[in-house]
Each structure stands twice: as structure tokens, then as C-alpha cells.
């Protein structure tokens, strides 16, 4: 198999499966965005089988699956992270939270910034219907905007979190996304140190209003090292740290984006200090659930009964220093599949870990734009839907629908899939050709993507596709694995 377009029948045949074996998930279509359901998603996960990890600091028994409340369902059937103006389906949130708790999930992670500021409120309503000792709530001081940097504004944000969540204390409180921004150290100092807000949070921990205090990390490694050095020097005692960890970021985070740090280093530093690791992005914003077809085929041949995504969740959960693995689950089938993976967890063997490392090595060669669809770059002042553009491009790249030459096999089919899918995924007035290069988005990207540069490249590629311009096609698409 190579990076070319496959029909559904050809793909199943390449896996060694007949069309009747459609329990294996197909790749998300560039044109439709639809995805099949796996056998694991259709099965009811067992009750009473959740894998738990013990917080060495407090003795808390934490479910290995943590519920990330950043992609809550809307009445329109979409994610509140994608359709930011759509009304959250509170009844569905309640049902899914009830189902999660029934199956052993007890860690719920939210933020004042999630779902356009609506996540904490919806989470609070759902959890208030349960006994307080049935769940642990994690939220963040998301004081990104300059107007929230002051001590007064940050304290107001913290107090509002208690109100929205309908609780008297926060189990796991985080400084949100340290290491981001153009001048990460200056921003860290301004958001948490010079305003005295970190001292305030420590005081709240001493009063019992915060049970555990930590931080989530993105970006500049100097900030991560600085925060841990603060503990080494006795200036602060962290109780846990949230990091990005998956089988691609373990060794290749820096190769994907030279501003990122390999999870192997981050995890090792936490283990040295006996700090529990909370894991975000186990699927890299869904990319590890939608692998390039040749790589998905490898995983499915080894385990046809489970999804490609389940490999990534098992990988993250196998590390003993991991306290919980967060997943943003919009639909009930997402929740059921992840529960099936962790009820109980079947840790990966050493051989399976090496197998995934080989898959990661191949994945890197696809030169995918490292967008996790976090939407921190949004809204664009000129209306461009930045994440949707990158998601569509990556999806088509992994499916072989980003042709580099007019004369290559299946050029017309791939060209049509890319252009039609682009117009369906992104309205014309929100496409890449409207980017003026203002750069307001770039400082907010945790993955440090050169957003205007990538948008301009995609815009040139789309124009080349429309005009069948052979030379420009080759200039605007990175080398693919079968070109090297």
C-alpha cells in the first residue's frame, strides 16, 4: 500500500477483510466527514471494571479514564467546541455524565474557557445531581486575556468557577497552559507570579478550598523546567502536572514541530519528582484515530475487533505514572468505546509498545500540519476557520487525496475529493485565501504552527488544483513517504 486513493472495497481487501467485516473503522471521508462504528462502540462496557490509579500525594483513587468537558454535545448534534454558538444539550450532558459515573469514571476536567465559557456551567448542573464524594472536579485558571491578568480579575475567575460548578472546593486546580505565547516566561510571570495569584491559590489549598494544585503545559520547555525548578528550590509544591502524551509525541513531538517537547522527557521529569501525570491529547486532537490508511491497516490487522483509537488510549494508560487520561467525548458511542478500553485496561506489552513506536516513525514522514483542533487560534478577526482548513487538509493528506502531480494515478478523483470536501467543510468566505497574514492567531497556538504561512501555502495549493498547475502543485505539497 502507498499513499494513494483507495475505495472502501480496496481498503478492506488490503486489510485482508471482506466487506462483511466492516466492524473495523474506515477512515473519515474528506467529502463527508462520516465515520463508521466499531464493534467495541456497539458493545455495552462492563460495570465495576474500571481501572483506577492512586494519587501518591492524597491517596485519591482516580479513574484511568478522565472525562474532558471541552467537547460537550449541542442540540444540533455537534460539539460545542466546533459550533461555538450552538446551545449545549444539557439533557444529553446529564445522561452521559450519569453513564460515566455508573461505569466508574470519577474525574471530570473543565475550564472557564471551554465551550465558549459554558462548560463549567453545564458540568456543574450535571454533577450537582450526584453526591460530592462520587467525583473529582478539575478546572483551571484560564486567565489568558490581558484584562484577566490582574489579581482581582483572576480571583474573580476562580470564585466564579466555584459558583458555576456548584461546589465548595476544587479537587484539582491548574494554572492553564503555561508555556504559550510569544514571550512565554514574561507571560507566566504576569499571569501568575507578579500579581500574587499563585500565592493566593496556595492559600486556598491551605484552607482546603483547593485539594491539589498543578499546571497544564504547552510550548516553551523553559517554562516547564522553570516550574519544576520552583519546586526543587522549595518555592512551591506541585501536586500533579498535566502534559500531552501519546505514541507520536513520545519521541517525535519536536520533529512534528520544533517548538514542542517530546513526551518522553516531560514524563521522565515528573517521575523523578513522583508527580502524577494527567494526560491530555491521547489522540492528538483525533489524528491518531484517523491515521493514514496504510498505518490504520497495520493496527487493524493486529486487532480487527478494536478501533485504531483504542491503541492510543491503551498506550497512554500503560505508563504507571499516569493518574488519568482525558478524553473529550461528544457522543455516547465515544464514551462507551473509551470505557471498554479502560474497564479494565489491558496494558500494552513491550512488543506492542515497540510496534506503536514504528507506526509513529512512519506517521512522521507524512508531514501533517500539527493542528489539534483546539481552536485557541479562534476567532479569526477576518472570519477564517483556521482549524477546519487544517483538519480538512490533514484528512485528505492521510487519505491520499492531496495529489502532487497532474499525471499521477487517480489525480482526477483525488482532486475532486479535495476541492469538493474543502467547500463542504469550510464556507468560501472562511477559506485560506482570505488570510491577510495579520498573525494574531499565531501566539495562541499551543503547537506553535506558523499559521499564516500554512494558510497561504494551502491557498496556493487550492488555486493550483483548480488550474491543474503542475509545477505549483509540487511546490506547495511537502514530500510524501513514497516520494522519499
Image (cartoon, rainbow, N blue to C red):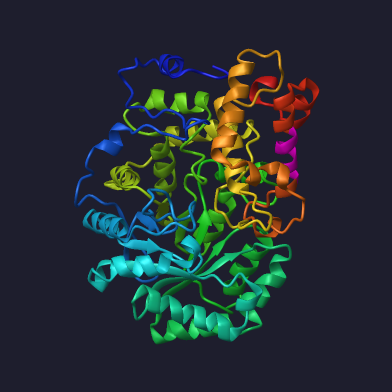
**Residue located 25% across and 67% down the image:** 134
Say if 164 sits above or below 406 in the image.
Answer: below
Q: Is residue 352 magenta?
A: no
Given the current orientation, which residue lies at the most extreme right position? 471
Q: Which residues are magenta?
A: 453-460
**Residue located 59% across and 52% down the image:** 265
Where residue 230 sits: x, y (%)?
61, 74
Residue 479 left/right relative to 82? right
Residue 71 left/right relative to 96? right
Q: Nearer the viewer, residue 462 or 95?
A: 462
The quadrant in which residue 393 appears is top right
Q: Quadrant of the C terminus?
A: top right
Q: Is residue 230 visible?
A: yes
**Residue located 44% across and 66% down the image:** 118
Q: Is residue 484 visible?
A: no
Q: Nearer the viewer, residue 365 or 332?
A: 332
| Main secondary structure along the magenta-highlighted residues | helix
**Residue located 51% across and 27% down the image:** 295
Say if 402 sits above or below 225 in the image.
Answer: above
Where residue 1 sits: x, y (%)?
54, 16
Given the current orientation, which residue lies at the most extreme left position? 47
User: What is the tally of numbered marks visible in this picture?
Assistant: 0
Say if 257 sits above or below 25 in the image.
Answer: below
Q: Is residue 458 magenta?
A: yes
Where residue 335 sits: x, y (%)?
32, 48
Where residue 187 sits: x, y (%)?
68, 71
Amino acid at each position: 500500500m502507498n499513499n494513494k486513493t483507495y475505495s472502501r472495497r480496496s481498503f478492506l481487501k488490503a486489510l485482508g477483510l471482506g466487506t462483511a467485516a466492516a466492524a473495523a473503522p474506515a477512515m473519515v471521508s474528506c467529502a463527508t466527514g462520516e465515520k463508521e462504528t466499531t464493534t467495541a462502540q456497539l458493545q455495552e462496557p462492563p460495570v465495576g471494571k474500571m481501572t483506577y490509579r492512586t494519587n501518591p500525594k492524597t491517596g485519591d483513587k482516580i479513574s484511568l479514564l478522565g472525562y474532558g468537558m471541552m467537547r460537550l454535545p449541542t442540540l444540533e448534534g455537534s460539539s460545542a467546541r466546533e459550533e461555538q454558538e450552538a446551545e449545549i444539550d444539557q439533557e444529553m450532558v446529564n445522561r452521559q455524565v450519569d453513564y460515566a459515573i455508573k461505569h466508574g469514571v470519577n474525574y471530570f476536567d473543565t475550564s472557564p474557557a471551554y465551550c465558549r465559557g459554558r462548560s463549567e456551567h453545564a458540568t456543574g448542573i450535571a454533577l450537582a445531581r450526584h453526591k460530592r464524594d462520587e467525583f473529582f472536579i478539575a478546572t483551571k485558571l484560564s486567565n489568558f486575556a490581558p484584562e484577566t491578568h490582574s489579581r482581582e480579575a483572576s480571583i474573580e475567575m476562580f470564585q466564579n468557577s466555584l459558583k458555576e460548578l456548584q461546589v465548595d472546593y476544587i479537587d484539582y486546580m491548574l494554572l492553564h497552559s503555561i508555556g504559550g505565547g510569544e514571550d512565554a516566561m514574561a507571560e507566566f510571570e504576569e499571569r501568575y507570579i507578579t500579581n500574587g495569584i499563585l500565592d493566593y491559590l496556595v492559600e486556598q489549598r491551605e484552607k482546603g478550598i483547593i485539594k491539589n494544585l498543578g499546571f497544564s503545559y504547552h510550548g516553551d520547555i523553559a517554562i516547564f523546567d522553570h516550574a519544576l525548578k520552583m519546586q526543587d528550590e522549595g518555592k512551591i509544591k506541585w501536586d500533579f502536572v498535566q502534559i500531552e502524551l501519546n505514541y507520536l509525541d513520545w519521541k517525535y513531538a519536536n520533529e512534528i514541530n520544533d517548538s514542542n517537547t517530546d513526551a518522553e522527557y516531560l514524563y521522565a521529569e515528573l517521575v523523578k519528582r513522583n508527580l502524577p501525570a494527567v494526560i491530555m491529547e491521547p489522540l492528538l486532537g483525533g489524528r491518531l484515530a484517523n491515521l493514514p490508511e496504510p498505518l490504520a491497516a497495520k493496527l487493524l490487522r493486529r486487532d480487527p475487533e478494536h478501533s485504531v483509537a483504542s491503541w492510543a488510549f491503551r498506550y497512554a494508560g500503560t505508563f504507571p505514572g499516569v493518574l488519568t487520561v482525558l478524553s473529550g467525548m461528544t457522543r455516547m458511542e465515544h464514551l462507551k468505546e473509551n470505557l471498554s478500553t479502560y474497564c479494565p485496561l489491558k496494558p500494552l506489552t513491550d512488543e506492542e509498545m515497540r510496534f506503536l513506536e514504528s507506526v509513529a516513525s512512519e506517521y512522521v514522514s507524512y508531514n501533517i500540519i500539527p493542528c489539534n483542533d483546539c481552536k485557541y487560534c479562534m476567532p479569526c478577526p477576518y472570519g477564517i476557520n483556521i482549524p477546519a482548513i487544517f483538519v480538512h487538509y490533514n484528512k485528505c493528506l492521510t487519505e491520499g487525496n492531496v495529489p502532487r502531480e497532474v499525471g499521477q494515478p487517480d489525480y482526477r478523483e483525488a482532486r475532486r475529493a479535495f476541492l469538493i470536501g474543502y467547500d463542504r467543510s469550510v464556507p468560501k468566505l472562511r477559506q485560506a485565501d482570505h488570510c491577510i497574514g495579520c498573525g494574531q492567531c499565531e501566539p495562541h497556538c499551543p503547537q506553535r504552527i506558523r499559521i499564516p504561512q500554512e494558510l497561504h501555502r494551502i491557498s496556493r495549493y487550492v488555486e493550483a488544483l483548480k488550474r491543474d498547475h503542475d509545477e505549483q502543485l509540487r511546490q506547495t505539497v511537502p514530500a510524501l513517504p513514497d516520494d522519499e
